[in-house]
Image: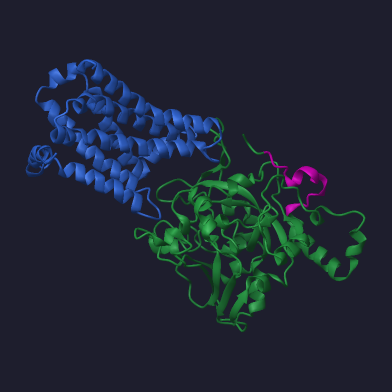
Chain colours: A green, B blue
Amino acid sequence: MLINIAKPSDTHESEVTPETVYLSRRRFMGGLASLGAGLAFAGSLKASEQHPDYGDVPPGDAPEWFKAKRDAAEWQAVMPSDPTKDKTAPYADASSYNNFFEFGTGKSDPARKAGSLVTEPWSVVIDGEVNNAGRFALEDIAAPSRFEERIYRLRCVEAWSMVIPWLGISLADVIERAEPTSKAKYVRFETLVDPEQMPGQRSSFALIDWPYVEGLRLDEAMHPLSFLALGMYGRELPNQNGAPLRLVVPWKYGFKSIKSIVRISLVEEQPLNSWQRIAADEYGFYANVNPEVDHPRWSQATERRLPNSLFNTNIIDTRMFNGYADEVASLYSGMDLRVNY
Amino acid sequence: MPMPATIFTLWRTGVFAAALLPLVWWGWQVANNMAGPEPGRYLLLNIGLGALWLLLCTLSLTPLTKLTRWKGFNLIRRQLGLWTLAYAVLHLICYVLFILGLDWARLGSEIVNRPYIIVGMLALLGLTILGVTSNRWAMRKLGKRWKTLHKASYLILALVLLHFLWVVRADMQEWFVYALTGTLLLCLRIPPVSRTLPKLRQRLKQSV
């Protein structure tokens, strides 16, 4: 039986903001709040002020600071331009079908095995070409930013995709607070290494050289769509989805969105990301979603939008930059995306 | 005590049921939404792995016969071979239906462009030839050449393992276990090794 979860859009169809004005609207709202004008909305809450109903999503066990930030979140700050086409995947699917090789190679391994991961307390080292280097508690990293909900399409390099409502903060905010020096050209991310907690790291046949590493060009990282998620579906991230802190870069293949981050370094040289290290002919540094450049082993022209069924495979055309071309294409003007795949 | 013929009938029926059971089980899981958000891929992967299991079972019959001299293993050889073919065909059907979405043009381009698909199709072609020539008429017609032809199953195993290897992305452990099992079964066919199997039987008998 399919679990029917009310979409956030169901209740507030009339309130949906056009895609082109999301970001400006967000700034506008933030500005109003800081002026103390928030009271003006007390009687008539806007869509973005209301907690969406995620039905029977398990409540989780978030620390108090997380709950406080969640209760003050701006909901549906970014939504798909057509929420009827990009339907949010049921929580049960998004939390039980994904890759997280630290917990095994099967799609259901993370959900079955990630219970052993301890996510509280959690700290992240921010270092490299920054003025404010150090080890910071996750709570302190998140503290200055308001939580936002962003509903993004997630396109896996394996040609399947889901629509997921993330809860978190803008990556640019965190980088700005670290004050990058003029030498900083790239951002390098690292996942936790702890074979005790992560059974996949105990395998002697693993092809990944732990820790899992990902990277972005600094301008990609500073792009308003680049996001650090601490939660999804109105709750904290379940362990299997990369708790307690993961990257979400919606115009790139899912493997760029590194999970359970313990280190963020601003660096001068382009980092060698894990998949590029394993198979550089199959996985590049950029890994932008691109229907015209196939993976050597399968086509990237289409994707299976999940959940699907035997009778409706839900195969749809993959869009350039996963449908975020208007926002991000300018980052790559003049680049040959066949070479820089 | 039942007659030997009855025992063998029961044995063959039991093997038939055991080979059919996984398909029924996976089908039941899909029908009850227990196969995850992508049931087509769930079937594809399970049936593909099932085909490899069946191929390994088929190839273990000769060493087992040599080790035990029990006639029963010979009686299910054709059945298991045909089950392997059936699973392989279902695996391809799943791929065409659920991964390609019945896009025949794409099937054409995938067969030409993707090495692991080419290798998989070659293995299926081999299994089909062996399946078609598995009846008595073909055995009579081919005479001595039948045995040589059906030794192609060793090559098919190698192709299947290569097909599997080229889908591995992050961890080799599972593949390695299958490759090791397959290598062991092939090694048991090297004459000096295979000659030791009946002797091993004698020794086991004496020690009992």
Residue A54 drawn at (x, y percent): 72, 47
Classify the position of the N terminus of chain B by image quarter: top left
Residue B47 colored in magenta in the image: no
Q: Nearer the viewer, residue A279 or A56?
A: A56
Q: Residue at x 24, y 27 (%)?
A: B129
- Identify the image quadrant of the C terminus of chain B: top left
Q: Is residue A12 magenta?
A: yes
Given residues B196 and A235, the one toward you in this image is B196
Query: Is any atom of residue B100 visible in this view?
Result: no
The boundaries of the magenta stretch are A4-19
Would residue A246 be found to the left or right of residue B13 on screen? right
Quadrant of the rendered image containing residue A129 = bottom right
Please identify the quarter of the rendering in which residue B108 is found.
Answer: top left
Residue A143, given in percent of the width and then of the height, sits at: 71, 71
Whether residue A139 appears in this view of the structure is yes
> Does residue B28 sit above or below A133 in this rendering?
above
Residue at image point 40% right, 31% down: B22
